[in-house]
Image (spheres, rainbow, N blue to C red):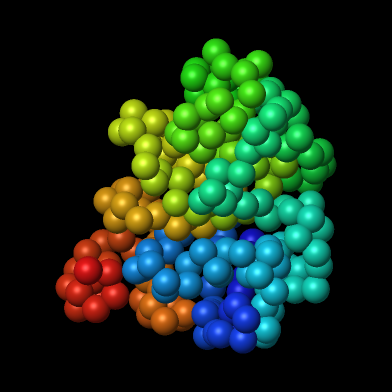
Amino acid sequence: MLSVHGLRAGYNGTSVLNGVDFDLSGGEIVSLVGRNGSGRSTMMQALLRIVKPTAGEVTLNGCSVANLETYQIVRAGLSYVPEERLVFHNLTVRENMTLGIQRRPNAVATWHPDEFWSIFPNLATRRDVAAGALSGGEQQMLTMCRSLLGNPDAILIDEPTEGLAPKIVEAVVGLILEMKRRGIGVVLVEQKLTVALEISDRVTVMGHGTIVFEGSPQELCARDDVRRKWLEV
């Protein structure tokens, strides 16, 4: 579904990604783990061309998206949930949802706003409240729902559980697993290693702008050397 080869990118002449090779299948959850500064968020932004790559090829459903604009990549089926929870603060929850709706006839799954009211009851009770008045956890829920209303084939999710209460983390994890069940490919950047290991089909470890390990959660648990060198503080 999503294939990345030799991806390089950086900021102001400084290299951050140093040749990333990566593949994602439909209905697969792949977690990117690593220390801060390892290049995980930059990789996500480079796939959407929010950060312009300096080299590499990206294909989505077999078609190159390397030269498309960000909005064209999203329309092609790749969505993004940023860590910053970028809601439209002056618009209501319902209006934020409406802005995310995109009809894609060949999408792997179709989502409707009414589904999310039952998944996240907090949003349902506050659907006519300005998004800027929501808590951080509620804004995270809203951002994920709005992205799914674009009916993506694959979705990039950056730090979805950061700073959330355990009950909200449970709801967010449940939604990610529902994405998998519906055939959506998920790339997840997650600081909580326990969450990443629990829900992922594969785990990739990034360090110095490259992927230094790739395997199942069980294989990573068995590699003390990888965890010591690339994950532990």
At 51% across and 51% down in the image, what residue appears? 83
Q: Residue at x 57, y 39 (%)?
A: 144
Measuring 39% from the left and 31% from the top, which residue is drawn there? Answer: 168
Q: Can the viewer see residue 19 in this picture?
A: no
Q: Is residue 75 above or below residue 42?
A: above
Give the number of callouts: 0
The extreme top residue here reads 125
Q: Is residue 83 left or right of residue 68?
A: left
| Residue 41, x across and y down, in percent | 51, 64
**Which quadrant is home to the N terminus?**
bottom right
Residue 12 visible? The answer is yes
- Left or right of 193, for residue 190: right
Which residue appears at 55% of the width and 13% of the height?
Answer: 125
Q: Is residue 218 left or right of residue 96?
A: left
Q: Position of residue 156 (x, y in %)?
A: 57, 55
Q: Position of residue 184 (x, y in %)?
A: 59, 48
Q: Nearer the viewer, residue 209 or 6?
A: 209
Q: As drawn, is 177 to the left or to the right of 233?
A: right
> Which quadrant holds residue 91?
top right
Corner quadrant of residue 103? top right
Q: Nearer the viewer, residue 3 or 155?
A: 155
Near-viewer residue (28 or 209): 209
Where 166 falls versus 207 (above or below)?
above
| Residue 117 image offset from top left, x and y in percent | 57, 20
Q: Where on the picture, by quarter, is residue 11?
A: bottom right
Position of 127 relative to 179 (above/below): above
Viewer-proximal residue among 11 and 22: 11
Please identify the quadrant where the C terminus is shown. Answer: bottom left
